[in-house]
Amino acid sequence: MPAPASDQPALRARELRKSYGGRDVVRGLSFSALPGAVTAILGPNGAGKTTTIECCEGLRRPDAGTIEVLGESVGPRGYPLGLRHRVGVMLQDGGLPMAPKAGSVLQHFARLHDEPARPEELLERLGITAVAGTSVRRLSGGQRQRLALATALIGRPELVFLDEPSAGLDPQSRLATWDLLREQRTAGVTMLLTTHLMSEAEELADHVVIVDDGAVVAEGTPAELTGEDEVRVTAAADHPDPAGVVAALSARLGDSFTIVARADHVALLGGTPDARTLGAIGSALDEVGYGTASVVSHRRSLEDVFLELTGRRLREESTP
Ligand SMILES: Nc1ncnc2c1ncn2[C@@H]1O[C@H](COP(=O)(O)OP(=O)(O)OP(=O)(O)O)[C@@H](O)[C@H]1O
């Protein structure tokens, strides 16, 4: 049964580090997940989300750092025995045996727990009752994904790890999954999920940890992360010196805005500028030869924040 809510984190990861073949993919990453809340680790492909969550699940061993789950330390050998029954895990690739039938797999997982949820009910909720008699191998990707979620929830865990829970699902299945996860939260279950879907983080998360290149670049509630107005100036052509653009704008505007400049756009955070300030912005941009294609003022979405922090362009994978 879920533990009563407290202020103590249900999970605390401190200064995690992990490298593969000399390449650092998790670089001093720290975050906490509060009990009864949904914490989303949001990041682009390759940011280190799966590595981080699998370290927290005790499936990968971090090179450095500490992890506490439900008050217990996760050591080099993974979870202490008693902890395993309190936690549910949904892996990114499902991690399911292929030969058995879907319903048998879930029954098997149910028998591992003292007070499991009813398998038939979970199958029904996730819309996979009709394939209960089909072998896992023959399930579609989305059906397998939902079965993996059912196996994570069958033991009525206190804490559930969900690695991209709705990746590859059609819109109906995604909504059914989100509804089920919201119910889990209402019942007091703590959830840590990874996602690169803004909509998933916006719909489900109480706390969002934005990760890029193996490190936390921002965190907060969705409202904290998105609560600011932004003026966005899109460049007509890439500018060679974004730092010079910031300097020119700061010289005219002082510290009334947080200014982020990239080759292709400038974002000014901190309020809606009046006509005089807009004039000053225009003059500063003219001064540094920043050709302006458009200027818009709007409330930032999570996607704006994410793209601002993690960049708008596809990145080459770094090499060792
Ligand atoms: N076992 C491994 N051996 C070598 N490199 C790995 C291994 N696992 C992950 N990586 C690399 O580490 C980096 C981070 O991978 P990870 O799967 O943690 O990222 P992610 O944020 O979950 O990405 P995605 O959203 O694409 O699933 C990637 O560059 C990946 O290629």
Image: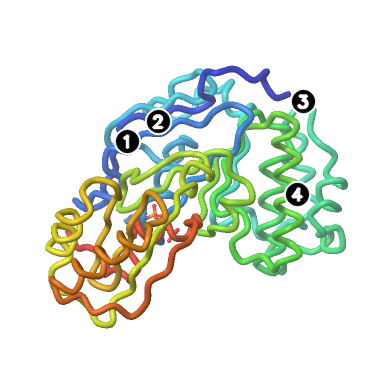
Residue drawn 58% across the image and 39% down it: 206
| Mark in front: 2 vs 4 | 4
Q: Earlier in the sequence, mark 2 or mark 4?
A: 2
Q: Which mark is residue 13?
A: 2
Say what amino acid the circle numbered 3 marks.
Asp
Say what amino acid the circle numbered 1 marks.
Leu
Residue closer to the observer: 290 or 166: 290
Q: Earlier in the sequence, mark 3 or mark 4?
A: 3
What residue is disc 3 on?
114
Q: In this rendering, is residue 161 above or below 9?
A: below
Query: How many residues crowd mark 1 within 10 Å: few (<14), some (14–19), many (20+)?
Result: many
Q: In this rendering, is residue 256 above or below 73?
A: below
Q: CA distance from mark 2 to mark 3?
A: 29 Å
Say what amino acid the circle numbered 2 marks.
Ala
Q: On the picture, is 297 further left or further right than 10?
A: left
What residue is disc 4 on?
179
